[in-house]
């Protein structure tokens, strides 16, 4: 019995001693891991901080590249000679297009209101009062009305011919400058394609001088070619938008002129019948 008791106590002691050794080993392992972590944490933090600084610098550099600076850089890379011609084409084309846009918007008239005012003036003050209304109204429709009223004493046939003839004159004034805009639309991509050809010639010259083909030799010439081509196409697209707007505006004004001219003849017929 005593032997069994001593054996049992010995087994318990061995188990307790083994558990104590495991706990001590675990504590030592945890302490070592903590020390390693504490030793490596500053290095990791420095690496993270360095990466953050690099990202901030990259973001700042990216923000510093504004649209103006990027366009300036591409202008220089495309070659000052042909890019200058393309830029001049854009400036002249935009100047003429904006002038036409302003002129056409100023030429737009509320024809219904003008017809009512002319009819009221004819009923109350006669031809001279109606002519005064036309003189004080801006636009080609009022100018046509004035010419027609000025010949009203010579008969309706003369008035109709006068309105038609002067309407052609006003249509010509509305379309003034459109041929130049269309010229710049055609000229811009041509200049771009010419720069493309020049760039390809430069690339082949570099290949001939080096006697070997490598990407670094032909990259410069091809880049110049592509930049000039894109620039010419962008200029042509911008001017084409303005050109189509002007054409649509002119068509609208001419239609208003024709409708208003017919209405003016009807008003004069009613006025003559009232005499």
Image (spheres, rainbow, N blue to C red):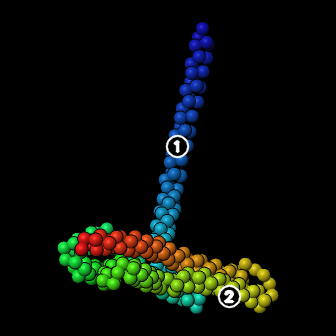
In the rendered image, is residue 94 in sight? no
Residue ID at (38%, 71%): 262
- Residue 218 falls left or right of residue 178: right
Q: CA distance from mark 2 to mark 1?
A: 72 Å
User: Badge 1, how many Cα within 10 Å: few under 14, some, many 20+?
Assistant: few
What residue sits 31% from the left and 68% below the top?
112
User: Which is more foreground, mark 2 or mark 1?
Assistant: 2
**Percent position of residue 229, x then y:** 62, 79
Decide if residue 32 is in sight here: yes
Q: Is residue 230 left or right of residue 114?
A: right
- Front position in the image: 181 or 165: 165
Judge left or right: residue 4 versus residue 43. right
- Upstream in the sequence, badge 2 or badge 1? 1
Instruction: Kindly identify which residue carries mark 2.
Output: 198
In the depicted structure, whether residue 45 falls above or below residue 213:
above
- Quadrant including the C terminus: bottom left
Q: Relative to 267, is 232 above or below? A: below
Given residues 218 and 230, the one toward you in this image is: 230
Question: Callout 2: few (<14), some (14-19), or many (20+) C-alpha neighbours within 10 Å?
Answer: some
**Location of mark 1 (residue):** 30
Residue extending furthest toward the top: 1
- Estimate the x, y position of residue 59 in percent, counting from the top left: 47, 68
Camera-nearest residue between 239 and 143: 143
Labels 2 & 1 near each other (Cβ < 8 A): no
Q: Position of residue 150 (x, y in %)?
A: 30, 84
Name which residue lies at 48% across and 79% down: 69
Label 1: state its secondary structure.
helix
Image position, residue 101 (x, y; %): 41, 78
The residue under the point 60% across, 21% down is 11
């Amino acid at each position: 019995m005593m032997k069994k008791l001593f054996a049992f106590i010995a087994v318990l002691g061995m188990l307790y001693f083994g558990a104590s050794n495991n706990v001590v080993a675990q504590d030592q392992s945890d302490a070592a891991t903590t020390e390693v972590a504490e030793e490596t944490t500053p290095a990791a933090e420095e690496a993270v901080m360095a990466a953050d600084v690099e990202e901030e610098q990259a973001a700042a550099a990216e923000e510093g590249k504004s649209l103006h600076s990027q366009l300036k850089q591409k202008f220089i890379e495309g070659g000052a000679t042909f890019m200058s011609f393309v830029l001049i084409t854009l400036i002249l084309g935009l100047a003429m297009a904006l002038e036409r846009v302003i002129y056409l918007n100023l030429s737009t008239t509320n024809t219904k209101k003008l017809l009512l005012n002319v009819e009221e003036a004819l009923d109350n003050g006669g031809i001279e009062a109606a002519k005064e209304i036309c003189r004080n109204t801006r636009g080609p429709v009022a100018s046509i009305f004035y010419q027609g009223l000025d010949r009203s004493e010579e008969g309706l046939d003369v008035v109709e011919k006068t309105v038609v003839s002067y309407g052609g004159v006003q249509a010509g004034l509305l379309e003034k400058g459109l041929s130049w805009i269309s010229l710049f639309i055609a000229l811009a991509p041509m200049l771009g394609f010419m720069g493309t050809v020049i760039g390809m010639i430069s690339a082949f010259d570099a290949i001939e001088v080096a006697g070997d083909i490598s990407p670094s030799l032909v990259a410069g010439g091809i880049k110049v070619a592509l930049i000039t081509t894109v620039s010419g196409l962008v200029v042509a697209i911008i001017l084409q938008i303005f050109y189509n707007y002007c054409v649509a505006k002119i068509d609208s004004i001419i239609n208003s002129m024709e409708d208003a001219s017919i209405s003016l003849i009807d008003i004069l017929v009613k006025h003559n019948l009232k005499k």
